Amino acid sequence: GDLVLKASPRTIRSLVAELREEVKQETVVYLPLDHPTGEAQIDFGELSFYEKGVLYQGYLFAMTFPYSDAKFVQIFKGQNFQCLAQAMNDIFFFIGRSPRVIWLDNMSTAVKKILADGEREVTDNFRRLQCHFSFESNFCNPAAGYEKGSVENYVGTARRNYFVPIPHFDDIEIYNQELLTRCYQDLNRQHYKKKVSVYQLFQEDLEAMASLPSSPFEAVNYQLARTNRQGMVTYHTNAYSTASHLVSKEVVLKIGAHTVEILTNQAKSIIKHPRLYGHKQESMIWGPYLSALSKKPKALKYTNFFTGLPSHLQTYFEKSDLSATKRVLQEVVKQVETYDYERVIGSLDQAVARYGDDTDDVISAFHFHLHPPLDMGTVKNPVPHELKKIPEYAFNLDVYQSLLEASYE
């Protein structure tokens, strides 16, 4: 028959306490490991930063080379595949080689499924990345971050060394390039254990790495989408403008870590936006819409384009008649086909601030600011960087007329 154990609750509690003590004594022992040359570890960590005065709760991407203790870091507004691939792409082409083996955890951007035998089924995107750079991936066991202890420790170190206080910058891509330079300068320190420079050891790492492919990895995804009746297209709840003629039309989204570019079905670029990482936000770039707006200048004051202009420009357009408004907008339309939208509007703002009374003066100054004179060094008569206001002169031609009349007498 069944064995019946008779024991009081106190006896059971004592037994459980003894078993717990036994389990505690079975401490996991971590063995010191020698890291081969040419291997890297990667990980993400949380981070705050300001871009153009806007606070973002973003992420840092860390890559370490345990043999040499070389370390590199980049920052992003997300931790999607495009961010992962862009970071690896930029670091590899900065150092000039790619690791043979990369250790990482089971991030969803890389691992689709953990199979019964412990193998990983990787995502299609990550497989493309592996094939492009020819590296093997070693995935850590679940909840075993210590298996890539080098990068785990560096996430916190990088946050303290590079991002305290919270960094402010205007362009995240330019800032990331500056970070790579700072990380490279850090290679001059002495290795904490081997007592030689990290730079010297990193040369051994590089020798063991693979050569780079002839071209960078295209860290983007393509997705079909359809515009609405306002010519806006939505991706992950966020809306992006296209162009005035693209109403209820199919377009292609080229989605990168930092940008979302709108393409036609024939792969012709329409407009490129900063990628939005919030929820139900909107990015409106008016360049492609200005041609239609220049034909309907009455509508200008009722658009978000108008309210987003600098105060000088708003005041100028409020005072200008429809003919002047139309002429200036037509000039802007021509220039945004060649120059960055913000540069064009900035040049117009400078022109209006100085020559806002006369349309011809505004247009001339606008072109002058947009195409500044070349720096020709020390010249006898240098070109000024500001157009001077020339006073109007009243001409009296009576004296010439009298001379002409005298010649006929």
Image: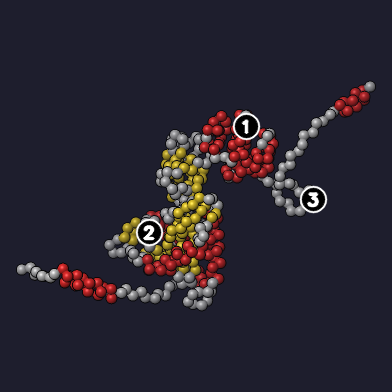
Q: Position of residue 68 (x, y in %)?
A: 48, 72
Q: Is residue 96 above or below residue 353?
A: below
Could you tell me the amino acid type at mark 1? Answer: Lys
Cα distance in 3D space between marks 3 and 2: 64 Å
Q: Quadrant of residue 364?
A: top right
Marked residue nearer the N-terminal end (3 or 1): 1
Q: Is residue 113 left or right of residue 129?
A: left
Q: Residue at x 37, y 64 (%)?
A: 139
Q: How is the image coloured?
A: secondary structure
Q: Position of residue 235 (x, y in %)?
A: 42, 44
Q: Residues within 10 Å of mark 2 (few under 14, many from 20)?
A: some
Q: Residues within 10 Å of mark 3 (few under 14, many from 20)?
A: few
Could you tell me the amino acid type at mark 3? Answer: Lys
Q: Position of residue 35 (x, y in %)?
A: 43, 73
Q: Is residue 260 left or right of residue 6?
A: right
Depth check: give the residue in front, 67 or 402.
Answer: 402
Marked residue nearer the N-terminal end (3 or 2): 2
Where residue 107 is drawn, which disc sits there? 2
Give the residue at mark 3. 380
Depth check: give the residue in front, 320 or 93.
Answer: 320
Q: Is residue 338 above or below residue 151?
A: above
Disc 3 and disc 1 in contact, CB within 8 angstroms: no
The C terminus is located in which quarter? top right
Give the residue at mark 1. 319
Q: Position of residue 315 (x, y in %)?
A: 61, 36
Marked residue nearer the N-terminal end (2 or 1): 2
